[in-house]
Amino acid sequence: MPTKVTIHYEKVKDLKVLEEVKELCPVQVFDKDAAGKVIVARNQDCIACHACDSNSPNGEVTVEEQ
Ligand code: SF4
C-alpha cells in the first residue's frame, strides 16, 4: 500500500526527534540534505511500519496510507 511520509517542520521543537526517527526507520526512508536537515528521501521504500510517526510525540512525522 503506498504511503505518504511527511515531516511537519513547524511542529519540530527538538531536532533530536528527527534524528531518532531517521535511525528508527528500518528501510532508510529518511536522509539528510547537504545542510544536515533530516528529509524524506525515499518515500517509495516505506513499508508502513509506523516506527516514525509513533515516535513523534508532537506529530512531527506523519504517515498516511493512500
Ligand atoms: S512508516 Fe516505517 S518504513 Fe515508513 S518511513 Fe516510517 S519508519 Fe520508515
Image (cartoon, rainbow, N blue to C red):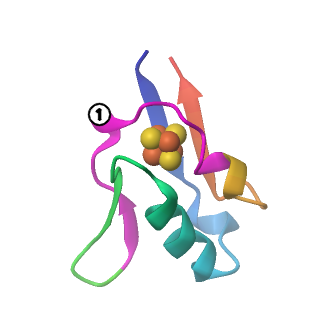
At 69% from the left edge and 58% from the top edge, which residue is drawn?
56
- The reply, left or right, for residue 8 in relation to residue 41 is right
47 drawn magenta: yes
Q: Position of residue 20 (x, y in %)?
A: 55, 70
- The reply, left or right, for residue 25 in relation to residue 49 is left
- The reply, left or right, for residue 5 in relation to residue 29 is right
Position of the N terminus by quadrant: top left
33 is higher (above) or lower (below) than 24: below
19 is higher (above) or lower (below) than 24: below
Rendered image quadrant of residue 17: bottom right
Query: Local crowd at mark 1 within 10 Å, few (<14), some, or many (≥20)?
Result: few
Q: Residue furthest right?
A: 57
Kind of residue sitting beneath label 1: Gln
At 67% from the left edge and 81% from the top edge, which residue is drawn?
14
Q: Residue furthest front?
A: 26
**Magenta region: which residues?**
37-53
Rendered image quadrant of residue 31: bottom left
Q: Position of residue 57 (x, y in %)?
A: 78, 60
Q: Residue furthest left?
A: 34
43 is higher (above) or lower (below) than 20: above
At 40% from the left edge and 70% from the top edge, which residue is drawn?
38
At 45% from the left edge and 64% from the top edge, which residue is drawn?
22
Task: Give the residue pinned by disc 1.
Answer: 44
Rendered image quadrant of residue 9: bottom right
51 is higher (above) or lower (below) than 35: above
Q: Position of residue 53 (x, y in %)?
A: 64, 48
Question: Which residue occupies the foreground of this view, 20 or 36?
Answer: 20
Q: Is mark 1 within 8 Å of ligand 1?
A: no
